[in-house]
Image (spheres, grey):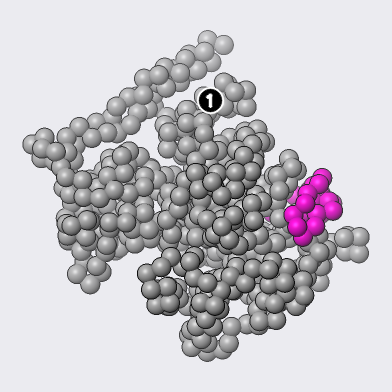
Amino acid sequence: MKSTAAHWPKHFYLIAQADQDSHGSHHAPHGRHARAKTGRESMGSKAWNLLRMAAIGLRVPPALVIGTHYTQAPDDCLLPAFSVGLPALEEATGLALGDPRRPLIVSVRSGAPVSMPGMMETLLNVGLCDATLPGLLRQTGNPRMVWDAYRRLVASYAEVVAGVDPALFEQEIVRVAQGRDERLLDFNELRGLTRSFQAIYQQQVGEPFPQSATAQLGAAIRAVFASWHAEKAVSYRKINHIDDQMGTAVTVQQMVFGNSGGHSGAGVGFTRDPMSGQPAPWVDFLVNAQGEDVVSGRRNAHGHEALAEIAPDAWRQLQEGAKALEHEFKDMQDFEFTVQDGVLHWLQTRAGKRTPLASVRIALDLLEEGVIDEDAALERTQSVAVESLGTLQLVTQGEGGQAAQTLARATSACPGVVSGEIALDGERAAARAAAGVPVVLVRQDAETADIDALGHALGLLTQRGARTSHAAVVARQLGKVCLVGCGDLHIDPASRSIQLGAKTLSEGEVISLDGNAGQIFAGAVAAVLVPDEPLQQRLLQLRKKKKSD
């Protein structure tokens, strides 16, 4: 980067590890452009944390960061990005955007100074086109992965940049897959799917899918900056009292491919259980997939066992890395990672959203482990009432103490017990909540677009989605009972009804969610708070000790 250092533009940052090559080897972190006059306010929390992860030796793909300064005028960043920033990233990776022989393929991600899970846009596989596809194929020797990445880019670019309805692409996948998991499609089927997607793009947008890698990247950067102003992002900031003026950074990062076969995959994890606070990694992982499959809320995922089975070395490194993250950031972390051909890559970390019960246990455990001091533990637990520490559990299931029949089971993303009328969209949820009626929001996917609707509901039940999907994370932060990935749930929008197993229920009928056992019941149920007395005592002892000091 000697050729660009003297002219390095303001509000740009490079995250790379010295002598890092395109195969991901890593050495001391490169800080020439990254650390000078930086912080989370200027480069965004996501990029700032990436820099710190690289500094403690975790394998982080090289990245170019365009600062929050450009949120209100994104076009101003494009000249320095392409004339100086991109060449530096290309030098760090040994690859070049649009090069037909050694193409650089990137993700383009948002990153505000404070965490806003899933509220802004991400684009993966940017830089893939007809000209660069053969080069990526030669680099990887994996035609299935290359065509899978290409069809993903066409669909996501169409949705995020051009505003095309993603359902059009989902319908085409259903047509081609004929009931199979799309991850089982071979390269020939994926090639055909890519061409079908391009035809859909042409039909909907009125022009061909862009074949210039530079044009793709420029449009992706603009779209990610624009997503700061998206309705769901504005709603999230309003709910959480976040300043509209802080803006977002954009991170352009070398892609690693979790969709490259049976020893690859993508995942999201917490260094501790965000529901109970228990000190063990809590991981969702999807084999042969990309990160958006897990966090989008449109796919189900598996636990850490799947990762341990297909990539045991990566699982061991992930457990060691989770401890390193807690010691660096002094808190429980929520992280995203990709495994490519058995090699673990870290893509993101942030303080994890958690229940009040988990927040107390985690703070007290970190205190005992010497990671934080008493003042920090007190600050993190001061808003929690001792008597509230416990789990809401069923005492009777149904009227008159009669045991209610379990209609279906799902994966719990947030514990507790709630009963409420079924609402199938935000309008219904808002109207019934305004009338003072408790509501359970029932949706096909756990998507962050439902942030407003979730604010009116007591709980969320979805047919698809992982417990670490962005919407589940937001539900946990809001204290909503959340069950995801209910395979026995089927929604009929036309009749405004749902089917849970063999039972059909209309919108407006009451269901109950047990977020502890992952069960769904017809009708209302009674619940009682079962106190966690040992945890209550630990918190009382800390508060008494500080008073006596």
Image x and y of residue 388, in percent: 35, 28
Position of the C terminus, as image quadrant, is: top right
Q: Residue at x 77, y 60 (%)?
A: 22
Image x and y of residue 365, in percent: 53, 25
Q: Residue at x 32, y 49 (%)?
A: 410
Magenta part of the chain: 16-43
**Whether residue 186 is visible:** yes
Is 235 in front, or is 255?
255
Residue 316 lies, with reference to residue 118, above or below; the image says above
Is 57 in front, or is 389?
57
Is 240 in front, or is 496?
496
Q: Name the residue that disc number 1 marks.
A: 365
Is residue 37 in the magenta section? yes
Residue 281 lies, with reference to residue 3, above or below; the image says above
Is 299 in front, or is 1?
299
Image x and y of residue 255, in percent: 66, 62
Q: Residue at x 17, y 49 (%)?
A: 522
What amino acid is labelled 1 in the image? Asp
Mainly helix, strand or loop, the magenta region? loop
Residue 505 lies, with reference to residue 372, above or below; the image says below
Q: Residue furthest top?
A: 548
Packing grade of label 1 (10 A; few <14, some 14-19, many >=20) is some
Q: Residue at x 50, y 17 (%)?
A: 542
Position of the N terminus, as image quadrant, is: bottom right
Q: Total marks drawn?
A: 1
Is residue 84 in the magenta section? no
| Tag 1 secondary structure | helix
Q: Seen in the image, is 305 located left or right of residue 140? A: left
**Whether residue 36 is visible:** no
Q: Quadrant of residue 169?
A: bottom left
Q: Residue furthest left?
A: 400
Q: Seen in the image, is 145 located left or right of residue 537? A: right
